[in-house]
């Protein structure tokens, strides 16, 4: 399956639209255990990315992803800015001068992104963060691929795992980030970052499904 | 949502433009990236202090930029830490050649953004040191939290650290003094009402007419527990008890007391709070030799108060008394 | 009612006790009758300034007692002017032998109580002069009202008159300058929320979530009209328009702008208000050479703002810039 | 009819109780057109008077009334303090060394009180103040007496006139005091001071009725 630079730009465009659409919901989730800005932060950041997309047309995928990461870092702030920013930067570093991605590149990209998030935020699974969505998603992607599933099928598996991971943050006690300040009271609330991470995986799946449907 | 604003998108910049117009003798304000520097920056040969954080805590930090306090402040979006670009630009703008100290409140976002900015500044050959402020006793400092939040101590560190830098102390000394202040300070806050993040448009949490929230932060985060409304005496008893026991402050200690308003609480109530604190310290044999009563580190229009106590010694008292000339704090000049 | 108080009966004294403890270097507080005097009172050979009014407007008046401003303040019950006993005792306590000036906001109660006190003081041989502050353009000065209310100008008169007295001017001169300031000042205020008089226990007036009140006073009195909530730009346009047209302030005038918070409005919003005022004055060719932005004359926890403009000349500017050292205003010392 | 110093003290005691009882109501009336403190002010003042009553036992009526006036001036503040304070002071000045009052003394006392209020506040009838209760009450008292009515009957007439005067403040435009600041908006609200003045007349009537009933 051919994933081109144009596809990546289209993915970022769709992702930005999704963040704007879900902005209020993400901020709502950030209220009981945070400071009510997660949706606003990401919408601000991805809107800035959209502004940059035209000048990225024709550029290689590495440049596109690194630019996205830098734009997020420069416009989001808060925790999610450096975290998602680093994620896109790390993924971008893998694809300098690449205008197309092969099936296996997605997995390595997501792994690099997660590694970047964990380096930056020093959190592990089970601390009620975006990691609890991304890590199981990547696991599912890998095992599906290992079992011979095609990329779209594998990403569908990953999306299911991401959703479960996101929901699994509800009963968790937050031990990282702002949610940890409310202690026991963090239990029973879905983590906003785990939710925005799930949206990213969903948009990714939708993008690959489109590409596949067009291809066939 | 009832606020004197034009729009959630423009409010931070509208306020910065207002500050620039009101205090052109003290500060210069830059946009894209947004930061505030003292009018005479960079001060050659002086260690520079740079702080910053989300907006909504005014006068923190921009109101503390000026002689004897901060060299620069980086205001982020409301309750959102500034981005590295702001911090880097401010750091470069105030660098006097002998090092820049970043004063960072202990929030994941602030830590990460200042960290990234520090890496970039160092890559450009600027000597950077950082102090992390974490004085909020409402949060347990354990494996199960991101550590204690930086609250009231921030104001005291910026004042005392600023005086140390103004006195010509080297970077390592200024850092030592800031860490000493942070280590000797404890705080705790409470809210009578929530606050409304402009972009969110509704209160971050709901409090009943007879409820109060104890152990709140400065971002409208809910606190540790919700209790029935109580008298000023009982509330101060609760907050002061937690603060005093934590350091702990002991009989005979000389202390600076900072009674802070959260933004929507009028001064008359803060003096009532201070009066209750004085009574408690009297009975415990703690000597309040300095005080600051007012709304200096706020959470938008939240009604409530926070208590901050700093154990003083000659070094810290002298630096506290040193001249300061900023929009929000001025004495000795 | 959500307030940091012990009881409506004790709150004024609790707050005064807190002020006394916080500012023992600046003021002395007396009880029965209640009044606040500067620590070095009486200052022999200096004209003394005495003001006062209902409590609930803090830092006015007690926060302005000290060198270069008031010699004494007389705090009444919340929103209730002080009684003659307080005013007489304060007048005697600060009398430096060359006359005492009473600074009285134009409210029937304040006028009558100061009048009675002045008669008693004069009977005891103290030279008394009075100035009446009436700068609120929201009220028509006509046969059909008790005249304009004294609001923001009070702060400016106390600062500038205090500087004149500190400079050694005689009673007639200090009175002339205070009247000059009052005559050259205009104000207007608005509220986003009402306030709750502690003893009453509920808001003095009800405002809907999308309503605001224009032309309010500092006692939670309802204003002249109720309008739908508007942007900071529109609100400032309304207030500034009324204020500018009334004096009127003209192109080329040099003006001191005082943006005041009503008690529950955070500083960030006041800077937004100031920014809008600056824009308007620019287009009108009015030069804002001095400014004061903060909550200095409040109505308990009311959210809202008031604009006060004073037409400056060299005499008034120099007296404004003169050193002042009080709990709420300090510069030049 | 014999009105003794004890009767006067009993009247003041009852009046203080009435003001405490009506405190919330008077403050309520002071909210739409004032600053919500009239009831609090008068309760504070008359409570202070009650404290003074024991030491006034046995004193002459002039002293009792002057003491009452001074205590009101020293404890009420606001507009009503100097106004009611002056009223009692002026009435008291008429009765130095008098331990008993005759029927006609009441009328002169009320006239002196009203004159004091008008001197202090510089207001006239029709400005929506306490004067609009007291002036018609005194007129009614005088004409009833002139027509030969006994004191109790005359004071009953006065009370009716006082109530009408109080209610007549509702449609009035306030031109004195704090209520004048709200301009046209003062129309439609009953004046708090006119209401407290009515309460005074009512307590006066009750007192005289008691004396009369005991006497007969
Ligand atoms: N140390 C961390 N590692 C990974 N993710 C984190 C960490 N701290 C916070 N997060 C994520 O960031 C989200 C909050 O982002 P956001 O609200 O934009 O920032 P802030 O908390 O600074 O307001 C949380 O829901 C959580 O998923
Ligand atoms: N100039 C005046 N002459 C007579 N009565 C007045 C005058 N001004 C005010 N009043 C009366 O005083 C009442 C208000 O008293 P109060 O609320 O105790 O004082 P304040 O208005 O100072 O808060 C009004 O309802 C009115 O009846
Ligand atoms: Mg957040
Ligand atoms: Mg945030
Ligand atoms: Mg009053
Ligand atoms: Mg009143």
Image (cartoon, coloured by chain):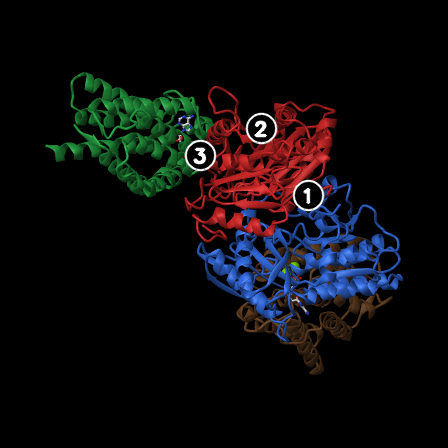
Chain colours: A green, B red, C blue, D brown
Residue density around tag 2, few if under 14, some if 14–19, many if 20 or more, within 10 Å: many
Extreme-left residue of the structure: A216
- Discs 1 and 2 carry the same chain letter: yes
Residue D71 coordinates in the image, percent (x, y): 77, 58
Asked whether the viewer can see residue D11, the reply is no
Instruction: Residue at 78%, 64% (x, y): give it.
Output: C175
Is the residue at mark 3 in contact range of ligand 1, meaning its CB lies under 8 Å from it? yes
Quadrant containing the C terminus of chain C in the rendered view: top right
Q: Disc 2 and disc 3: Cα gap in Å?
A: 20 Å
Instruction: Residue at 29%, 42% (x, y): give it.
Output: A54
- Report the residue marked by disc 2: B135
Is the residue at mark 1 in contact range of ligand 4, meaning its CB lies under 8 Å from it? no
Q: Mark number for residue A78?
A: 3
Chain letter of the residue carrying label 2: B
Residue density around tag 1, few if under 14, some if 14–19, many if 20 or more, within 10 Å: some
Left or right? Give the position of B129 relative to C166: left
- Discs 2 and 3 carry the same chain letter: no
Task: Decide: is B112 above or below C311.
Answer: above
Q: Mark number for residue B330?
A: 1
- Discs 3 and 1 carry the same chain letter: no
């Amino acid at each position: 399956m051919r994933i081109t630079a144009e596809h990546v730009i289209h993915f970022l465009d769709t992702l930005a639209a999704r963040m704007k659409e879900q902005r209020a919901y993400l901020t709502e989730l950030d209220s009981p255990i945070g400071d009510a800005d997660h949706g606003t932060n990401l919408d601000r950041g991805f809107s800035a990315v959209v502004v940059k997309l035209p000048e990225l047309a024709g550029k290689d995928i590495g440049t596109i992803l690194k630019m996205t990461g830098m734009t997020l870092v420069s416009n989001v702030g808060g925790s999610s800015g450096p975290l998602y920013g680093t994620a896109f930067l790390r993924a971008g570093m893998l694809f300098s001068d690449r205008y197309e991605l092969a099936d296996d590149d997605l997995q390595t990209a997501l792994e690099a992104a997660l590694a970047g998030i964990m380096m930056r935020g020093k959190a592990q699974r089970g601390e009620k963060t975006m990691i609890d969505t991304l890590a199981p998603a990547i696991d599912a992607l890998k095992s599906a691929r290992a079992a011979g599933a095609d990329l779209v099928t594998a990403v569908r598996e990953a999306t299911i795992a991401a959703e479960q991971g996101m929901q699994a943050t509800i009963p968790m006690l937050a031990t990282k980030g702002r949610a940890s300040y409310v202690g026991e009271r963090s239990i029973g609330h879905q983590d906003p970052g785990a939710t925005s991470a799930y949206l990213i995986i969903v948009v990714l799946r939708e993008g690959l499904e489109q590409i596949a449907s067009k291809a066939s | 949502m009832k606020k004197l604003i034009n729009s959630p998108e423009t409010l931070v910049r509208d306020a910065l433009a207002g500050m620039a117009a009101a205090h052109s003798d003290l500060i210069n304000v830059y946009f894209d990236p947004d930061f505030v520097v003292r009018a005479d920056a960079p001060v050659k040969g002086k260690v520079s202090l740079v702080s910053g954080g989300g907006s909504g805590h005014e006068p923190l930090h921009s109101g503390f930029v000026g002689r004897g306090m901060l060299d620069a402040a980086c205001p982020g979006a409301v309750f959102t830490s500034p981005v590295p670009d702001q911090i880097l630009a401010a750091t470069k703008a105030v660098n006097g050649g002998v090092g820049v100290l970043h004063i960072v409140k202990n929030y994941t976002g602030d830590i990460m953004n200042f960290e990234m900015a520090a890496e970039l500044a160092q890559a450009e050959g600027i000597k950077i040191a950082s102090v992390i402020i974490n004085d909020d006793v409402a949060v347990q400092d354990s494996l199960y939290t991101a550590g204690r939040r930086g609250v009231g101590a921030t104001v005291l560190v910026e004042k005392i650290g600023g005086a140390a830098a103004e006195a010509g102390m080297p970077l390592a000394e200024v850092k030592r003094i800031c860490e000493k202040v942070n280590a000797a300070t404890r705080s705790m806050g409470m809210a009578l009402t929530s606050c409304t993040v402009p972009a969110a448009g509704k209160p971050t949490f709901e409090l009943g007419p007879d409820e109060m929230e104890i152990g709140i932060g400065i971002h409208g985060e809910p606190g540790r527990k919700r209790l029935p409304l109580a008298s000023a005496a009982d509330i101060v008893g609760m907050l002061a008890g937690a603060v005093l026991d934590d350091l702990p402050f002991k009989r005979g200690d000389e202390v600076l007391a900072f009674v802070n308003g959260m933004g929507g609480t009028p001064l008359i109530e803060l003096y009532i709070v201070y009066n209750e604190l004085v009574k408690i310290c009297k009975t415990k044999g703690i000597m309040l030799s300095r005080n600051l009563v007012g709304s200096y580190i706020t959470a938008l229009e939240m009604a409530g108060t926070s208590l901050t106590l700093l154990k003083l010694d000659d070094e810290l008292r002298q630096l506290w008394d040193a001249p300061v000339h900023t929009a929000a704090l001025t004495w000795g000049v």
